[in-house]
Structure formats: structure tokens, C-alpha cells
Image (spheres, helix red, strand yellow):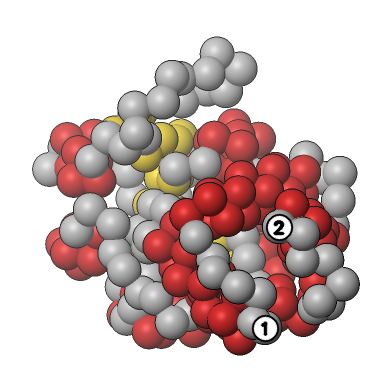
Amino acid sequence: MFKALLWDLDNTILDFNLAQANSLKAAFERFELGECDKDIIDKFAEINAAHWQMLEEERITKNDVYRLRFEALLSECGKQGIVDALEINDCFEKGICNTISFLDNAYELLFSLKKEYALYCVTNGATDIQKQRIRDSKLNEIFLEVFISDEIGFDKPNKEFFDFALSHIIPCERDEILIIGDSLSSDMKGANNAQLKCCWYNPNCLPRPESIRIDYEIQKLDEIKKILGN
């Protein structure tokens, strides 16, 4: 049924939440901002998600995300004026690469699937950072190609992002392509925009929205095998 599988990277294959927490702690230490406790980590996760949501809705640019999220966090922590928002953002972004942790035995699953399917990665984010994480995780040995929004010039969920990706994968019909990801606003909505089938990775059993078409839903990554008929 499916020939090509397009996988999201962060919080689908790699544990971005863990990488984010570790990198934020390191950035606070680097700039002597005091203890980066769980409350700060949780607050940043909330702020960060809200700003990426605004990007996906084309309300702000990616450079705005990088600056505004740390301006908001520093303000929340009473640390404004101590360090430039873009300076701490740069430190944070580079630190993301220092934590490589797979979710849900993702590497083993992908390694087994690559024998039968053409596997690709579709991700938003900074090109240098995502490429390094792909190399460090050895996912470059599994994916035939990695499509990064910064290189393409469009972010998920824009149709143009997926149009570019589809023009660079193996020849197949749209109904032979499946997008797998955790994000409703970028992965599932992106699949809707591009008229592609989608599978929502929903390990936290969140309620399914009525406004977005979801063709399949899994709580564990290896459940994808049933969808694929393996």
C-alpha cells in the first residue's frame, strides 16, 4: 500500500524535550543566570511551543521565534537585560546537538523498515543543527534524504514544503505516501494541506481534534507495523 514514509524528527524519533531541557540548563549555567529548575524548563517548553505555533500560522518569522521566545523567558524569570536573547538562543540551539536520545526504540524500528520502504525525514529547524543531529544519531544511514525547512524555504505545514519533498522522493502516487509525526499543527495539518495520508504519533493519548483529518493514530511507534501490514 505505502512505498514512501515521511518521518518527523523531533518528539517522534528523537527526544527533543530531553535535549531542550539539557541545553537550557547548560545555557543558564553559561550565562550565570542561576538555577534552571523544572518550573523554568516547563515555562520555556510552553513559550517555545507557542512561538513555533505562531510560525506555523505564518504570524511571525523563524528569526522572530529565536529572539522572542528567549525575550519572553528572560522576562518571566526576571533576568531581562542580563544577556541578549539571540546570544542565549545561539548557545541553546548549539546545545541541542549534545543530547541524542531515541524515543520508543525508534532507531531499531526505522532500521527494520528501511528494507521494505523508502524512508525520509521531514523537519522544521535550523539546517546546521538538524544535520548534525542526523549525523550524530546515524539516521543519515537510514533516511534516503532529509528535508529541512530552512533549506527548502518553507516550513511545515505549508504545502510548498511537501511539494518540494515529493519532487525529490522515489516515484509514487500520493496515496502511497504516509507522513508520521507527533505534531497536529505541522505534521498532520501539513499532510492535510498536501493531500497526503498521515499517522499521528500520540503517546500521551491526547484527544483527537475534529478540525484536522487524521488517517491513523498510534501510541507506540511499533504500532506502525500493523498499519503497514507487517
**Residue beneath the point at 39% across and 52% down:** 12
**Residue beneath the point at 60% across and 73% down:** 34
Classify 10 Å Cα crowding around label 2: few (below 14), some (14-19), many (20 and above). few
Asked whether, in this view, residue 178 is left or right of residue 87, the answer is: left
Q: Which mark is residue 77?
A: 2
Q: Distance between the residues labelled 2 and 1?
A: 14 Å
Label 1 belongs to which residue?
Answer: 31
**Which is nearer the N-term, disc 2 or disc 1?**
1
Classify 10 Å Cα crowding around label 1: few (below 14), some (14-19), many (20 and above). few
Residue 73, percent across and down? 72, 57
Relative height, residue 7 to residue 151 (above, below): above
Residue 155, percent across and down? 70, 55
Under mark 1, the amino acid is: Phe
Asked whether, in this view, residue 103 is left or right of residue 173, the answer is: left
Label 2 close to label 1 by CB (< 8 Å):
no
Relative height, residue 42 to residue 78 (above, below): above
Q: Which mark is residue 199?
A: none
Relative height, residue 15 to residue 59 (above, below): below
Figure quadrant of residue 138: bottom left
Residue nearest the observer in this picture, 78 or 223: 78
Residue nearest the observer in this picture, 26 or 156: 26
Q: In which quarter of the image is the C terminus?
A: top left
**Residue beneath the point at 54% across and 35% down:** 184
Figure quadrant of residue 223: top left
Figure quadrant of residue 212: top right
Q: In which quarter of the image is the N terminus?
A: top left
Under mark 2, the amino acid is: Cys
Residue 191, percent across and down? 56, 38
Question: What secondary structure is marked by label 1?
Answer: loop
